[in-house]
Image (cartoon, helix red, strand yellow):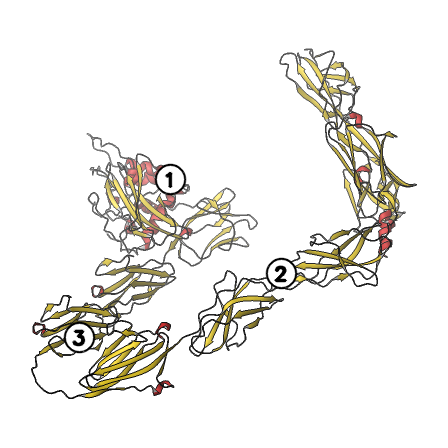
C-alpha cells in the first residue's frame, strides 16, 4: 500500500464518517460513499480473519464488559456468516442490554427476520452471556461497518467490526481509466477504499465492434454532480473516491454560498474521553435563533451541554465527554443545516501501581494489589497463560482504581508468576509459598523399662491441629489392648502396658504434612538380683507455706493446680490420694495423680467449684505409714447480681436497684459496674468506671421519652461477673407543666362548664387526660369531679351546690403522674345566668335560598339564649304542619330538613326563639324551581329570501323562576333532521337565516331557565317554504357610519349596603367613542393609586373593587367618563355596617 499505516483510531474515524455520509442527507453535488477496501489487499478466504491492523474492530486487548468481541471478516456473496460476542456479567447487578447496529445508529434489532437472526445464551457457571448475530445469504448491501453495544445501568462498552462482501471476479473491459482500479495514479487517495461492492453489477456484454475512445474527463466536467455515479457505472469506473479527488483538482467547483451560515461546522471533531469539546458556527444574522441536534434529537441546555451566543458566533460546548457523546450533531438555522460528527477516544487504562512479589507460608492468605488510571476499568488476571476467575479459593476485588487478587490458604501449587493486564499495560508479581515449620516443644526420650511395667512416649508440638502416626522400626503402630495412642491439644502420647521383650525397638512419631520425625528407643531390662531390701518408714514432705495459710491451697477457677509432694521411704511407699472417702485414681482425666519414685503430683486441670474440699494423702510401706491433710479452696468471679429493677424516673434520670449475687465467688464483693442501652439496640454504654459499692444507683443524662434497659456486673478480687439479666424497659419521663387559661364557659343552677388550654410543656410522655377538682371558697377540701381522666379540653362539672361560691382547678395526667394544678383565681357562683335569645342566621340564608325540585335541603341555624329558648317555625305566617318538612332542635341550634324538595315547599319560613317575654325572629325565603313548560303558539310570521321570522309566547309554567332564554331548532321535510339555529335566545322571536332554496322547514322551540331546557317542546303550527325565484340582489352603496359619540352610561351605579371586613365591588357600564377617560371619586375627591381600591375596565364595564371596607370607606362614590365630545357622570351611596356581635365582642375585649 503506498500510504503509510495510520494509527489504530483513524480507521474508526473513517468508518464513522462513512456511516455519517450514509445517514445524513447528501448536499448537492455529493456522492454517497458506503465502504472502502484497500486496492492492493489480497482477497481473504471465506471465514478468515482480517489481519490488517488498521481494520476497525480487529482483535485487540479485551477491555470493558466484553469477554469476546466479534471480528471483521470477508464473506463471499450468498454465504452465511455469524458474529459472536460474549459479556461477563459477574460484576453486573442486572442483565446487560445488547444492541447490534449497522453504521452508527441503524438498529438491526428492528430488521430481525429470515435475513438477520439473533441468538442469546447464558452460562450460569461462568456468568457469561453469549450473543450471536447471523446474516443469512449475504448480499452486497450487507457490506459496511457494524457496531455492537452493551449497556448495564451506569456501565457501557462497544466495539466495531467490518463486513466485506466478495463477489465472483469478473473481467472488466479495458478502459483508459484503468489508473483508477487500484493502480496508484491518484496519488495519496489511490487504493484507499473501495465502494464497488455496493454498486450494481451489469451483465457482461460481448462487443463485436471495438468501442471508440471517449474522453470521460470532458463528460464529467460538463455533467451534473448527480450524474457522476451513472457515468462511472457506464464506463466501468470502480474507484469513485479517487475519481472525484482527481476531478476536484481539475475542476474547482465554486462552493454554494449559504444564506444562513458564514462558517459551518468542521467535518468532524475528536476528543478524549472525559475532556471538553467545542463546536462553532458563524451566522449572517446575529439575531437568528439556532437549534442543536444530536442524532436528530434536539439538545436542551444543561450543565453538560452549554450554549453560547456572542455576536454572530454560536458555540456548543460538551463537558466531560463519554462514549454516549460519540454521535452526529447538527446546527439548524431555519431550513438550513450544518452537519458534523464527534468522535470520543477512550484513553488506554494504565497501571499506576505495579504488583509486588509476595512471600507467604502454606495456609496463609495471599493478596496481589495494583492500581489503574481509571475507576471502574476492567483488568484481567492470569497465571501461566491461564486467565484466573472467581472460585471458592480465588477472589477478585475491585474498589475504585484499586484491584486485588486474593488467594485463600495458599499451597505449594500456587507458586508462580501472576500477571495483571489492562488495555494500556501489564504488571507481574511472583508468589513464593514456603512450607510451614513445625516447632517441637518437647521431644520423645529413650526409655528403659522392665518386664510388666508401662512405657510412655510423649511429645509436644506447637500446633494443636497437627495429627501424626507412630512407627516401630519403620512399621506403623496399630492401637490394641496394650498399646494406646492419644492426642490432647499439642501433646501426643504412645502408651505400652505390660512391656514385653518383643516391644523393644526404635519408635518414631511423624506429623502429617511436615518433613519432620521424632525418634526414641525402648530398651527392655531384665534384672535378676537378690538382695535384702532396706526398710525406712515413709515420710511426706508437704510445703504449703506459699499459699498463705497452713495446708490450704487457693486456686482460681479455670486455672491448673499441680501440687508436687516429695515422698521418702524404703522400700518405695505406696501413695493414695483421697477426697473425703473417695480415692482419686491415677488414670488420665481432669483430676488425676501422677506418681514417680520419690514424687507424687496431684493435678487438677481447669479447676472448678466442685473441686473444692478436704484432700488427704496417705503413704504406706512395710516399715510404716504417713498421712497429711490439706484444703483446696476454689475462688471465682461472683455470680451476676439479681432482680435489677427501676424504682423511679425523672425527666432525664432513673433510680435503679438490685440484689447482691447469691455467690460471691469465694472473695468479698468490692462493688458493681452498671451499663445501659436503648431498647432494641445492641450497644451497651458503661455508666461507671470505678466500682460502685451500693446496690442503688441513679442513672443520669438520659433522653426523655426513650425506653432504656439496665444490667449490672459484680466485681470481686478475682474479676468481673457475667452481666445480670436486663431490667424491664423503663422510660425517663416527667409530668407536664400545669394547664393554662382555665376559664368558665357556662354556669347553671347545678353545673359549671369549664375550658382550658393544654400545658405549655408536654414532654415525651404526652397527656393522657385531665382531672378536674373543685372546693368551696375558703376551704382546702378539693373534690375530684371525674374519676377517669378526660381527653378533651372542656368539661361540665355536675352536681354542684346551688348558690355556693366555688373554686376550680385542672391537673394534667400522664405516665409520670400529676402535673402542677391550674387553679382559678376567682370563685364562681353557681347560679343560672340569663342571656337574651339571639338567632345567628348563616350568610347564605340572608338572601333567597334557591334549590331545584328533588334536591335535599338541610338548613342548620344556630341560636343562643339562657335558659334554653322555645323554638317555633312558621311558613307564610301559618304554623308549619307539612309532614315532609322535618324539624330538629338542640340546645344551641335548630335544623330544617327536607328529603326531596317540591315546589309546594317554596315560601317564607319564619324562625322564632323566645325566653319568657324576650323573642328574636328571622325570615328565610326558600324558592324551589323546576324546568319550565314549552312555549305557546309558535308561528312562522314571515318568509323572505333565505330567511324566516318566528314568534311565540312565553310558557304558562315558568318553573317558579324567570325564563333565561329559548333554544330554536329547524328541520327540513326531506331529511327530518333537527339542527340548532339559536341557543339562549332571550326574546320570544327570532329570524332563521341561511335556509336552503327549495326546502320546506318546520321549527321547534325549547324554553330554558336555571334548571335547563324544558322537557316538552313546542312545534311551529306552520312551515316556511323557501321558493326558487330568480332573485337579484342589488347591494346598496356602503355608507360608513359615524360611530363618534359622547360618553353615556348605559348602566348606572347602584346604592349598596355592605358588611365591614368583606371585600365588595361597585360597577357600571359606559359607551363612548373615542374611548373615554374614566375617573373614580369618593365624596367628590379623586381616588388615586390607593392599594385598597382596584379599578377595572372590561370593554366598557367599569368596576371599582374595595378590599375589606371599614366604616370610614362609606360615602358617596361617583364615576366620570370624559372624551373630546363631552362627559357623563353617575354616582351612588355606599353604606358600611359593622355586625352587632362583632361590636359586642370588641367591647368585651376592651
Cα–Cα gap, marks 1 and 2: 88 Å
Mark 1 / mark 3, whichever is N-terminal: 1
Question: Residue 463: where, in percent of width, then height?
Answer: 25, 71
Question: Residue 1107: where, in percent of width, then height?
Answer: 79, 48
Q: Name the image quarter holding residue 822.
A: bottom right
**Secondary structure beneath label 1:** helix
- 943 relative position to 686: left or right: right
Query: Are the residues tagged 1 and 2 within 8 Å (C-beta)?
Result: no
**Residue shown at the point (11%, 87%) measured from the top left:** 532
Report the front residue among 43 and 351.
Answer: 351
Which label number is shown at residue 225?
A: 1
- Note whether residue 1095 is visible: yes
Cα–Cα gap, marks 3 and 2: 74 Å
Mark 1 / mark 2, whichever is N-terminal: 1
Count of numbered labels shown in the rendering = 3
Compared with 538, 58 (above or below) is above
Question: Residue 337: where, in percent of width, then height?
Answer: 47, 45
Characterize the local packing of mark 2: few (<14), some (14-19) or many (20 or more) Cα atoms within 10 angstroms.
Answer: some
Compared with 891, 114 (above or below) is above
Mark 3 / mark 2, whichever is N-terminal: 3
Report the front residue among 410 and 1072.
Answer: 410
**Secondary structure beneath label 3:** strand
Which label number is shown at residue 478?
A: none
Marks 1 and 3: which is nearer the front?
A: 3
Outermost right residue: 917
* Residue indicated by mark 2: 764
Compared with 218, 548 (above or below) is below
**Residue shown at the point (30%, 63%) measured from the top left:** 406
Characterize the local packing of mark 1: few (<14), some (14-19) or many (20 or more) Cα atoms within 10 angstroms.
Answer: some
Which label number is shown at residue 456?
A: 3
Amino acid at each position: 500500500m503506498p500510504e503509510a499505516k495510520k494509527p489504530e483510531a483513524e480507521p474508526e474515524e473513517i468508518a464513522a464518517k462513512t456511516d455519517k455520509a450514509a445517514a445524513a442527507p447528501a448536499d448537492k453535488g455529493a456522492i454517497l460513499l458506503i465502504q472502502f477496501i484497500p486496492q492492493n489487499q489480497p482477497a481473504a478466504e471465506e471465514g478468515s480473519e482480517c489481519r490488517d491492523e488498521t481494520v476497525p474492530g480487529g482483535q485487540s486487548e479485551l477491555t470493558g464488559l466484553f469477554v469476546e468481541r466479534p471480528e471483521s471478516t470477508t464473506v463471499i456473496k450468498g454465504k452465511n456468516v455469524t458474529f459472536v460476542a460474549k459479556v461477563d456479567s459477574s460484576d453486573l447487578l442486572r442483565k446487560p442490554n445488547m444492541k447490534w447496529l449497522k453504521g452508527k445508529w441503524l438498529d438491526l434489532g428492528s430488521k430481525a427476520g429470515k435475513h438477520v437472526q439473533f441468538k442469546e445464551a447464558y452460562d450460569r457457571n461462568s456468568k457469561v452471556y453469549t450473543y450471536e448475530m447471523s446474516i443469512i445469504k449475504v448480499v452486497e448491501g450487507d457490506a459496511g461497518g457494524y457496531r455492537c453495544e452493551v449497556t448495564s445501568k451506569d456501565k457501557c462498552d462497544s466495539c466495531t467490526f467490518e463486513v466485506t462482501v466478495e463477489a465472483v471476479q469478473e473481467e472488466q473491459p479495458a478502459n483508459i481509466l484503468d489508473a483508477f482500479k487500484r493502480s496508484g495514479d491518484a496519488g495519496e487517495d489511490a487504493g484507499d477504499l473501495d465502494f464497488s461492492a455496493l454498486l450494481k453489477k451489469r451483465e457482461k456484454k460481448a462487443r463485436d465492434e471495438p468501442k471508440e475512445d471517449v474522453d470521460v474527463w470532458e463528460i464529467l466536467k460538463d455533467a451534473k454532480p448527480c450524474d457522476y455515479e451513472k457515468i462511472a457505472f457506464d464506463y466501468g469506473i470502480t474507484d469513485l473516491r479517487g475519481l472525484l479527488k482527481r476531478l476536484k483538482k481539475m475542476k474547482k467547483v465554486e462552493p454554494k454560498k449559504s444564506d444562513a451560515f458564514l462558517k459551518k461546522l468542521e467535518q468532524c471533531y475528536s476528543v478524549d474521553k472525559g475532556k471538553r469539546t467545542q463546536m462553532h458556527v458563524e451566522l449572517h444574522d446575529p439575531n437568528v435563533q439556532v437549534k442543536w441536534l444530536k442524532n436528530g434529537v434536539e439538545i436542551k441546555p444543561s450543565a453538560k451541554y452549554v450554549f453560547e451566543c456572542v455576536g454572530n458566533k454560536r458555540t456548543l460546548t460538551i463537558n466531560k465527554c463519554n462514549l454516549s457523546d460519540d454521535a452526529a450533531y447538527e446546527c439548524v438555522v431555519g431550513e438550513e443545516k450544518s452537519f458534523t460528527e464527534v468522535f470520543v477516544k477512550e484513553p488506554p487504562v494504565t497501571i499506576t501501581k505495579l504488583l509486588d512479589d509476595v512471600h507467604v507460608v502454606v495456609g496463609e492468605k495471599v493478596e496481589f494489589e495494583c492500581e489503574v488510571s481509571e475507576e471502574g476499568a476492567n483488568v484481567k488476571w492470569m497465571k501461566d497463560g491461564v486467565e484466573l476467575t472467581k472460585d471458592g479459593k480465588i477472589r477478585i476485588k475491585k474498589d475504585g482504581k484499586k484491584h486485588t487478587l486474593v488467594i485463600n490458604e495458599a499451597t505449594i501449587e500456587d507458586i508462580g508468576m501472576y500477571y495483571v493486564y489492562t488495555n494500556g499495560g501489564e504488571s507481574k508479581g511472583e508468589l513464593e509459598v514456603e512450607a510451614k515449620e513445625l516447632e517441637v516443644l518437647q521431644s520423645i526420650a529413650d526409655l528403659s523399662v522392665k518386664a510388666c511395667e508401662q512405657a510412655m512416649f510423649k511429645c509436644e508440638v506447637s500446633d494443636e491441629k497437627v495429627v501424626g502416626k507412630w512407627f516401630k522400626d519403620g512399621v506403623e503402630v496399630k492401637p490394641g489392648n496394650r498399646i494406646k495412642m492419644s492426642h490432647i491439644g499439642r501433646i501426643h502420647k504412645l502408651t505400652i502396658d505390660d512391656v514385653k521383650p518383643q516391644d523393644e525397638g526404635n519408635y518414631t512419631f511423624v506429623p502429617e504434612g511436615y518433613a519432620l520425625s521424632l525418634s526414641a528407643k525402648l530398651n527392655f531390662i531384665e534384672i535378676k538380683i537378690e538382695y535384702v531390701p532396706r526398710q525406712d518408714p515413709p515420710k511426706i514432705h508437704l510445703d504449703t507455706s506459699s499459699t498463705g495459710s497452713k495446708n490450704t491451697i487457693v486456686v482460681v477457677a479455670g486455672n491448673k493446680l499441680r501440687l508436687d509432694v516429695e515422698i521418702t521411704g524404703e522400700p518405695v511407699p505406696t501413695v493414695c490420694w483421697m477426697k473425703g472417702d473417695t480415692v482419686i485414681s491415677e488414670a488420665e482425666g481432669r483430676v488425676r495423680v501422677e506418681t514417680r519414685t520419690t514424687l507424687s503430683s496431684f493435678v487438677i486441670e481447669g479447676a472448678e467449684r466442685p473441686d473444692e474440699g478436704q484432700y488427704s494423702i496417705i503413704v504406706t510401706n512395710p516399715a510404716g505409714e504417713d498421712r497429711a491433710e490439706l484444703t483446696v479452696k476454689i475462688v471465682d468471679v461472683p455470680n451476676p447480681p439479681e432482680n435489677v429493677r427501676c424504682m423511679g424516673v425523672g425527666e432525664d434520670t432513673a433510680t435503679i436497684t438490685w440484689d447482691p449475687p447469691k455467690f460471691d465467688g469465694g472473695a468479698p464483693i468490692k462493688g458493681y459496674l452498671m451499663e445501659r442501652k436503648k431498647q432494641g439496640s445492641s450497644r451497651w454504654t458503661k455508666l461507671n468506671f470505678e466500682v460502685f459499692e451500693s446496690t442503688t444507683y441513679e442513672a443520669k443524662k438520659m433522653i426523655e421519652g426513650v425506653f432504656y434497659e439496665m444490667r449490672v456486673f459484680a466485681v470481686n478480687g478475682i474479676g468481673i461477673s457475667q452481666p445480670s439479666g436486663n431490667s424491664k424497659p423503663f422510660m425517663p419521663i416527667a409530668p407536664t407543666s400545669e394547664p393554662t387559661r382555665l376559664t368558665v364557659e357556662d354556669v347553671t343552677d347545678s353545673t359549671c362548664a369549664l375550658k382550658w388550654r393544654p400545658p405549655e410543656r408536654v414532654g415525651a410522655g404526652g397527656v393522657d387526660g385531665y382531672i378536674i377538682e373543685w372546693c368551696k371558697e375558703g376551704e382546702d377540701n378539693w373534690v375530684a369531679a371525674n374519676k377517669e381522666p378526660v381527653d378533651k379540653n372542656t368539661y361540665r362539672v355536675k352536681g354542684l351546690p346551688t348558690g355556693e361560691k366555688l373554686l376550680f382547678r385542672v391537673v394534667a395526667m400522664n405516665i409520670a403522674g400529676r402535673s402542677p394544678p391550674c387553679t382559678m383565681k376567682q370563685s364562681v357562683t353557681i347560679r343560672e345566668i340569663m342571656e337574651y335569645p339571639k338567632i345567628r342566621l348563616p350568610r347564605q340564608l340572608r338572601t333567597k335560598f334557591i334549590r331545584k325540585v328533588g334536591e335535599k335541603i338541610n338548613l342548620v341555624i344556630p341560636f343562643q339564649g339562657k335558659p334554653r329558648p322555645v323554638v317555633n317555625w312558621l311558613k307564610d305566617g301559618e304554623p308549619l304542619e307539612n309532614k315532609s318538612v322535618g324539624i330538629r332542635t338542640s340546645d344551641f341550634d335548630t335544623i330544617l330538613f327536607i328529603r326531596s324538595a317540591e315546589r309546594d315547599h317554596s315560601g317564607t319560613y319564619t324562625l322564632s326563639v323566645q325566653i319568657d317575654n324576650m323573642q328574636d325572629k328571622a325570615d328565610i325565603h326558600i324558592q324551589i324551581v323546576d324546568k319550565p313548560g314549552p312555549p305557546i303558539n309558535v308561528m312562522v310570521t314571515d318568509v323572505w329570501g333565505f330567511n324566516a321570522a318566528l314568534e311565540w309566547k312565553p310558557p304558562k309554567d315558568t318553573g317558579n323562576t324567570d325564563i333565561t332564554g329559548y333554544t330554536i331548532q329547524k328541520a327540513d321535510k326531506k331529511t327530518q333532521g333537527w339542527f340548532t339555529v339559536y341557543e339562549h335566545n332571550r326574546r320570544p322571536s327570532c329570524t332563521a337565516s341561511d335556509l336552503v332554496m327549495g326546502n320546506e322547514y318546520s321549527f321547534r322551540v325549547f324554553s330554558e331557565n336555571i334548571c335547563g331546557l324544558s322537557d316538552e317542546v313546542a312545534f311551529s303550527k306552520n312551515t316556511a317554504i323557501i321558493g326558487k325565484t330568480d332573485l337579484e340582489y342589488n347591494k346598496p352603496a356602503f355608507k360608513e357610519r359615524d360611530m363618534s359619540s359622547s360618553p353615556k352610561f348605559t348602566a348606572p351605579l347602584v346604592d349598596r349596603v355592605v358588611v365591614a371586613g368583606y371585600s365588595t365591588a361597585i360597577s357600571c357600564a359606559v359607551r363612548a367613542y373615542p374611548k373615554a377617560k374614566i375617573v373614580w371619586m369618593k365624596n367628590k375627591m379623586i381616588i388615586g393609586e390607593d392599594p385598597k381600591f382596584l379599578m377595572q375596565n372590561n370593554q366598557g364595564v367599569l368596576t371599582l373593587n374595595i378590599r375589606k371596607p371599614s366604616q370610614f370607606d362609606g360615602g358617596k362614590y361617583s364615576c366620570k367618563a370624559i372624551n373630546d365630545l363631552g362627559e357623563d357622570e353617575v354616582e351612588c351611596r355606599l353604606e358600611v355596617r359593622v355586625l352587632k356581635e362583632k361590636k359586642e365582642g370588641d367591647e368585651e375585649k376592651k
